[in-house]
Amino acid sequence: MAGTAETGVLLGMVRQTTQHAHGRLIAILWVAALIVGVSVAGGCGGAPAAPLPAGQQVAPVPSARNRPPAPREYLAPRRTGTIALDGRLNDSAWSGVPWTSVFVDIEGSMRHAPRFTTRVRMTWDDEFWYVAAELEDTDLWATIRTRDAVIFHDNDFEMFIDPSGSTHRYVEIELNQFGTVWDLMLTKPYRDGGKAVN
């Protein structure tokens, strides 16, 4: 496969399974490797961000005191074994895949540390990008069962895929306790008047 910079095209589908044990939700998702410029062979750099339309400006950068922390980095190793999409992480393919550091609030030190642990593992092969998420919670619930409904009204797990790092033309994949999925593309952030494209 060659790298691609196509934006807004979701090739493939998301599958998931969940396992409930002692208040933990473990979700395993897989996404086709060609997704919004993320191509296994082409790397995750994506294409440079295109210029904004005439008259449109990017929101100003907040002062250092109010700025969220810089994104953390994670190097996902290539898959070395078979992965069963069953909600368990004891497959040989996961054995050499490290966990990310524990997630923090998007506003960093401006908010309290989360009460429960959230972390992920990621790996890839020539066809797919695999994400295993471990989310601890004592009250697992959901209400939405319709695909592409606004899932974030429930407790959910969300992935934001923005290869160019521009916050424009990026993909979100959201999943709730029932396994209901909302995959969407945003041409620009909500704060800039962006609308979800299902």
Image (spheres, grey):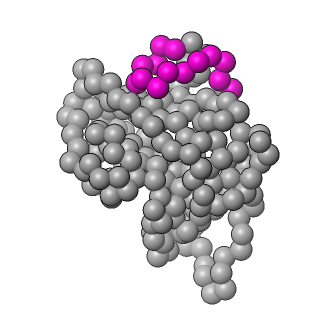
Dominant SS of magenta comes to loop
- Above or below — where is 88 with respect to 125? above
Q: Residue at 38%, 30% (x, y): give it.
A: 17
- For the point 70% across and 44% down, the residue is 39
Residue 191 at x, y percent in the picture: 45, 71
Q: Can you give x and y, in whole percent of width and height, for residue 128 in the image?
A: 62, 35
- Between 7 and 107, the residue placed more toward the observer is 7
Residue at 45% x, 71% y is 195
Q: Which quadrant, please, contains the N terminus?
A: top right
- Counting labels gives 0
Residue depicted at 59% across the width and 73% down the height: 58
Is residue 139 rendered to the left or right of residue 176?
A: left
Can you give x and y, in whole percent of width and height, for residue 149 in the image? Answer: 33, 58
Which quadrant holds residue 86? Answer: top left
Where residue 167 appears, x then y in whole percent?
58, 62
* Quarter location, residue 50: bottom right
**Can residue 101 be seen at all in this image of the molecule?**
no
- Quadrant position of residue 135: top left
Image quadrant occupied by the C terminus: bottom left
Asked if residue 45 can be seen in this view, the reply is: yes
Above-or-below relation of 141 to 190: above
Residue 88 within the magenta-colored segment of the rendering: yes
The span shown in magenta is: 78-91
- Say which of 75 and 83 sits in front: 83
Q: Is residue 87 magenta?
A: yes
Q: Residue furthest front?
A: 12
94 relative position to 113: left or right: right
Q: Viewer-proximal residue, 198 or 112?
A: 198
